[in-house]
Amino acid sequence: MIPDPYARSVCLPVVLKDGTWLLFNEQPLPAFRDGTLAELVMSPFAFVDKEQRKVWTTEMTAPFLPAGTALWVEVAHEHVPESLRRFVFEKLDEFKIPRYCVQAFLLEDVLLHVRPGKYALLGSCRCDIPALVRLSQSVNETYTRISEAFEPNRRSHTGNVFTKVFHEGATFVQSLGRRRVQVELSAPPGGSSSSSDSSGNRQFLLPGMEQPS
């Protein structure tokens, strides 16, 4: 079985020294594959610029994926019941690793709620699951319903949709986790594409997407 690169993460303690990130013992960082994603976790008081600290510590809501997007929910294909195997497709991810997935579709735009220091949350949205001939009310429920049907051997049918659900890219399927990072970084601090909702949260528009009502 091919190892899942998202199954676990590696934590490297680092320190900023004269403008360069080094390992905590001040040795150079090891070489990483091009395109590797990482998150920099620090105290908010590490920011020199107070305005930058405000930008990166303010909650925001942003468009994540539009209605009509095809989602691919990964399942453990070796445990799929025979009657459902025809609904499992092999898709290649950005590392060219095969993912065995079941298709679903977004029927509504979905928003991303980013909470500094906490896990980001996807907003509710209706989804269509053709293989099960049913609708769900969120991406999380979509994952659960597919897992219940396609992975009956599992004790629990919850999971991290940012690592187990993908959307269609130009040449490969992209994890929702990678999409999340793109959205979080696409919002220009103080740019003209930002606004605030009634609760004071930042709202950002991505290219080609309209302001959610």
Image (cartoon, grey):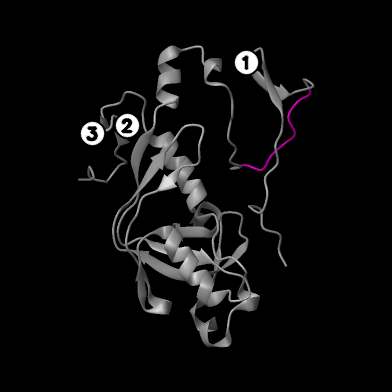
- Residue under the image location 71 percent in, 59 percent down: 3
Q: Which residue lies furthest to the left in this view?
A: 213
Query: Is tag 3's residue or tag 1's residue first in the polypeptide sequence?
Result: 1
Q: Which amino acid does label 1 sit on?
A: Gly
Q: Residue furthest bottom?
A: 83
Circle 1: element type: loop
Q: Residue 36 carries which label?
A: none
The residue beneath circle 2 is 202
Give the number of the mark in front: 2 or 3.
Answer: 3
Q: Quadrant of the N terminus?
A: bottom right
| The magenta segment | 27-34
Q: Does residue 78 lie above or below 9 as drawn? A: below
Quadrant housing residue 25: top right
Q: In which quarter of the image is the C terminus?
A: top left
The local crowd at label 2, few if under 14, some if 14 to 19, many if 20 or more residues have their Cα within 10 Å, is many
The residue beneath circle 1 is 19
Which sits in the foreground, 148 or 36? Answer: 148
- Residue under the image location 51 percent in, 76 percent down: 149
Q: Does residue 59 lie above or below 92 as drawn? A: above
The reply to whether the C-beta atoms of the residues labelled 2 and 3 are less than 8 Å apart is no
Q: Which mark is residue 198?
A: 3
Give the number of the mark in front: 3 or 1.
Answer: 3
Residue 171 appears anywhere in the view: no
| Residue 21, position as x, y percentages in the image | 67, 22
